[in-house]
Image (cartoon, grey):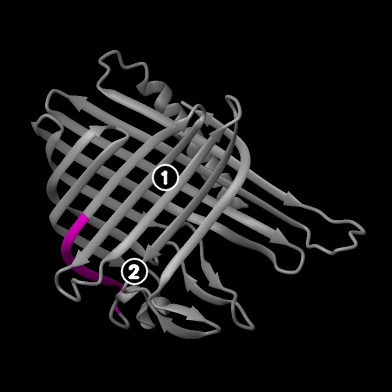
Amino acid sequence: MRLLKLIFTLGILFTAFIAAAQEDTTKLWTIKGENTLLLNQSSFTNWASGGVNAFAANLSLNYDFNYKNGKWNWDNKVIAAYGQTFQKETDWRKNDDRFMINSLLGYEASEKWFYTFFMNFNTQFANGYDYSGDERKFISAAFAPAYLSFGPGFAFKESDNFKVNLSPAAARMIFVNDQVLADAGQFGVDPGKKSRFEFGASLDAYYKVNIMENIAFENILKLYSNYLEDPQNIDVDYTANLFMTVNRFITVNAGVQLIYDDNTMLTKKDDRIGPGIQVKQILGAGVTYKF
């Protein structure tokens, strides 16, 4: 719950920053943001067919800071999210945990085409555990892993809602800032080391469309191929979000994230079974405050 308070505090700080930035009369910045609190609950009392009482709360911040001055464009997206679910039999467990910064600096080469330099950073806030065995197993933590990618490239930008960036010379650093996980060689680092360097090609794509009034569909795709080791094994990170607006403050959000990372060894009942497709789904109704 302390992490939920932390993310809420970050939302207040972002709100203050946006309020100050919107007073800028030069109009060089376009700033948009959403703070969303999703709640789910199921409760059963003397229910003949049975059931388990459950409660879930998810807090997410999603902000865009886009700058345009002449031929220069600088697009930035910040996403912070954390959530927990509670069942009487299992107590509290997290169901969402991510912090992401995407930044793309571009110089216009021709209409809709840009020379670019990109930077992506991804990590999480709290420890993660595998509950498939008899006892929970520690499998991740803040900055364990963390991913930092950057490099030059070129991009096609139709609008803030449709852009594709390709970098054929992208560096990627993987950090495992926990000695236990580092000693186990998790997330592709050599056992005992806390970082790994990769060099390859990166593709980032973003597309958001309004399906109909008050319903928007967002797609975020990231692909990476490491030239230095098994370049044919492409890492994939795809997120799809569906936003349904009831009114100014009430929304229904559904999201799914699919990840394939050749360096991440999945576990099942304490056995490492190798890389595979990771799937996360979130559905909930809640309160959203937009700027």
Instruction: Please check the rendered image and state whether residue 76 is part of the magenta-colored stretch, yes or no.
Output: no
Q: Secondary structure at mark 2?
A: loop
**Residue at x-position 33% and y-position 41%:** 207
> Circle 1: is it few (<14), some (14-19), or many (20+) Cα within 10 Å?
some
Q: Is residue 78 left or right of residue 283?
A: left
Question: Given this view, does label 2 or label 1 mark the residue nearer the observer?
Answer: 2
Give how far across and how far down residue 216 sits, in percent.
Answer: 46, 35
Give how far across and how far down residue 146 sits, in percent.
Answer: 35, 62
> Circle 2: is it few (<14), some (14-19), or many (20+) Cα within 10 Å?
many
Q: Is residue 287 left or right of residue 53?
A: left
Q: Which residue is mark 2?
A: 261
Give how far across and how far down residue 90 sits, in percent.
Answer: 71, 68
**Residue at x-position 28% and y-position 24%:** 29
Label whose residue precedes the other's in the sequence (2 or 1): 1
Residue 231 in view: yes
**Residue pushed farthest right?**
46
Q: Which residue is mark 1?
A: 79
User: What's the residue type where badge 2 is placed?
Assistant: Asp
> Would you say the magenta stretch is mainly helix, strand or loop?
strand
Does 162 sit above or below residue 199?
A: above
Query: Which residues fall within the magenta stretch?
Result: 193-202
